[in-house]
Image (cartoon, rainbow, N blue to C red):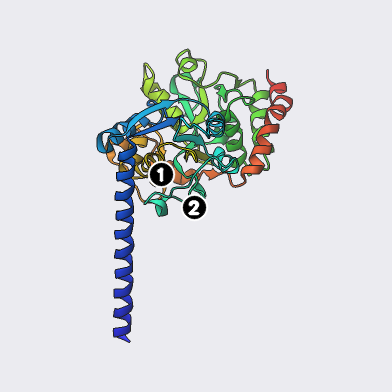
C-alpha cells in the first residue's frame, strides 16, 4: 500500500514538474516571439492612469518593446478594433469590466491566460481567457475633514443620512462612477443591480434635507471647497488626495456597510499586428512586478484579493485591506441586468431624486 502511495506521489510530482517546465518553455517561446515583433501599441492605457508608465518602461527595458498609446473610452476601443480589422493600429486595450463581455460578443478579441491565471478570482475573469480584471475599483468616500460642519467623519452609508455636510455624487446621467455610487448605496441597503430602488430612496432622503451636491468630485471642485463628502472610485479618490495642496485635510475610505466593486480588463485585439507582444504585456501585468506597478498608481491589484502581499511602502498609500474585508464589496453578478438598470437610471434619478432637491 505504502509503495502504491509513493508511486502515486512520485507520479504526481513528475507531472507537476513536467507541467511547470512546459509552462516555462511556453513563456520563453512567447518572450522570443514578442521580442521579434519589437513593439506593442495600446489604447486607453496612458502613462498617468494606474501607473501604466511603469509597465511600459519595464517592457521596454526587459524585452526591448517600443510602445505608443492612444487614449480613448472603452466603447471607442472596441469600435476601433472592429473598424481596423484589415489594418490594426492597436494590439491591446484596457476597458471597464462591463466591456470585456461586450468585446467578446463583438468578436474582436483573442484569448490569453497568463501563468498566474489561477490566482485571479473566478468572478474577475472570462473562463476562456478573453478578459480578466487586472485591478479593481470600489466605490469609496472622499471626505474633506475641514468641511464637516461639526459632524464626525462618515464611515458608513448610514452616517451620510445624519450628517450636516453636502454629499456629492456627480452626474448620474453621464458618469459611470456616479451610477455605480447609486448601485453601491443600493447594495448597502439590501438592493442590487436588479433592484436599484434602495439606492434611489437613499439619495432622495439626502436631497429632501437639501444636502445633495451636484458637483462632480474632481480635484478642481474639491480644491474650491465645492465637495464636502464625495462618492467615487477608490483609485480616483487616492489620486486626487495625493495631488491636493493640503492632502492631510482629506480621508478616502470604504464604507463599512457595503459597496460595489468593479475593475478594468485588458483586451487583446484579434487582428493585432503584434499579438505576442500583446500577450506578453498581459503576462507581465498579472506578474508580481506588473501588479505592484498598478498599486503604485493607486489601483488595487486583483491578486491583492488572493496571494499578493503589498510591500509596506506601497500599502501605506492605499486604503487598508481590512476596510475591504469589513465592507465585503460585491461585484456586479448580472451584467445584462445592470446594463438595463443603468440605462433607466438617469430618468429614475431625475424623477425621484433631483425633483426633491431644495
Image coordinates of residue 119 in percent, x first then y, are 40, 52
In the image, 136 versus 211, the foreground residue is 136
View extreme (top): residue: 224
Q: Residue furthest front?
A: 86
Q: Which residue is mark 1?
A: 322
Picture quarter with the C terminus:
top right
Residue 162 in sight:
no
Residue located 40% across and 21% down the image: 249
Residue at 71 percent across and 24 percent down: it is: 350
On the image, which quarter does residue 79 sit in? Answer: top right
Q: Label 2 crowding class (10 Å Cα cut-off): few <14, some 14-19, many 20+?
A: few
Mark 2 or 1, closer to the camera = 2
> Where does the image place residue 205, in percent across and percent down from the top left?
66, 29
Residue 276's label in the rendered image is none
Q: Which residue is mark 2?
A: 122
Query: If you read the primary sequence from the N terminus, does the residue marked by circle 2 or circle 1 appear first?
Result: 2
Return the residue nearer the eye: 266 or 219.
Answer: 266
Amino acid at each position: 500500500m505504502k509503495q502504491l502511495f509513493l508511486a502515486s506521489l512520485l507520479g504526481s510530482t513528475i507531472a507537476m514538474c513536467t507541467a511547470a517546465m512546459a509552462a516555462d518553455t511556453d513563456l520563453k517561446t512567447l518572450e522570443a516571439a514578442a521580442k521579434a515583433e519589437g513593439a506593442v501599441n495600446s489604447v486607453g492605457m496612458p502613462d498617468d492612469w494606474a501607473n501604466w508608465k511603469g509597465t511600459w518602461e519595464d517592457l521596454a527595458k526587459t524585452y526591448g518593446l517600443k510602445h505608443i498609446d492612444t487614449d480613448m473610452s472603452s466603447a471607442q476601443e472596441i469600435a476601433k478594433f472592429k473598424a481596423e480589422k484589415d489594418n490594426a493600429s492597436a494590439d491591446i486595450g484596457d476597458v471597464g469590466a462591463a466591456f470585456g463581455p461586450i468585446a467578446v460578443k463583438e468578436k474582436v478579441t483573442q484569448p490569453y491566460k497568463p501563468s498566474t491565471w489561477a490566482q485571479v478570482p473566478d468572478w474577475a475573469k472570462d473562463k476562456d481567457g478573453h478578459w480578466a480584471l487586472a485591478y479593481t475599483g470600489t466605490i469609496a468616500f472622499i471626505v474633506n475633514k475641514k468641511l464637516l460642519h461639526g459632524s464626525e467623519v462618515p464611515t458608513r452609508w448610514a452616517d451620510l443620512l445624519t450628517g450636516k455636510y453636502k454629499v456629492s455624487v456627480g452626474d448620474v446621467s453621464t458618469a459611470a462612477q456616479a451610477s455605480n455610487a447609486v448601485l453601491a448605496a443600493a447594495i448597502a441597503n439590501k438592493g442590487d443591480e436588479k433592484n436599484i430602488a434602495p439606492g434611489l430612496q437613499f439619495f432622495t432622503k439626502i436631497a429632501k434635507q437639501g444636502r445633495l451636491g451636484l458637483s462632480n468630485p474632481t480635484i478642481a471642485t474639491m480644491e474650491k471647497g465645492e465637495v464636502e463628502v464625495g462618492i467615487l472610485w477608490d483609485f480616483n479618490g487616492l489620486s486626487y488626495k495625493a495631488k491636493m495642496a493640503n492632502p492631510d485635510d482629506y480621508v478616502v475610505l470604504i464604507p463599512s456597510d457595503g459597496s460595489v466593486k468593479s475593475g478594468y480588463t485588458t483586451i487583446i485585439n484579434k487582428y493585432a499586428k503584434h499579438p505576442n507582444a500583446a500577450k506578453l504585456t498581459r503576462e507581465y501585468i498579472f506578474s508580481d512586478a506588473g501588479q505592484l506597478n498598478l498599486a503604485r498608481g493607486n489601483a488595487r491589484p486583483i491578486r491583492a484579493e488572493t496571494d499578493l502581499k503589498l510591500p509596506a511602502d506601497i500599502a501605506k498609500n492605499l486604503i487598508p485591506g481590512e476596510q475591504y474585508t469589513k465592507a465585503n464589496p460585491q461585484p456586479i453578478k448580472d451584467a445584462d441586468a445592470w446594463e438595463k438598470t443603468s440605462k433607466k437610471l438617469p430618468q429614475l434619478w431625475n424623477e425621484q431624486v433631483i425633483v426633491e432637491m431644495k
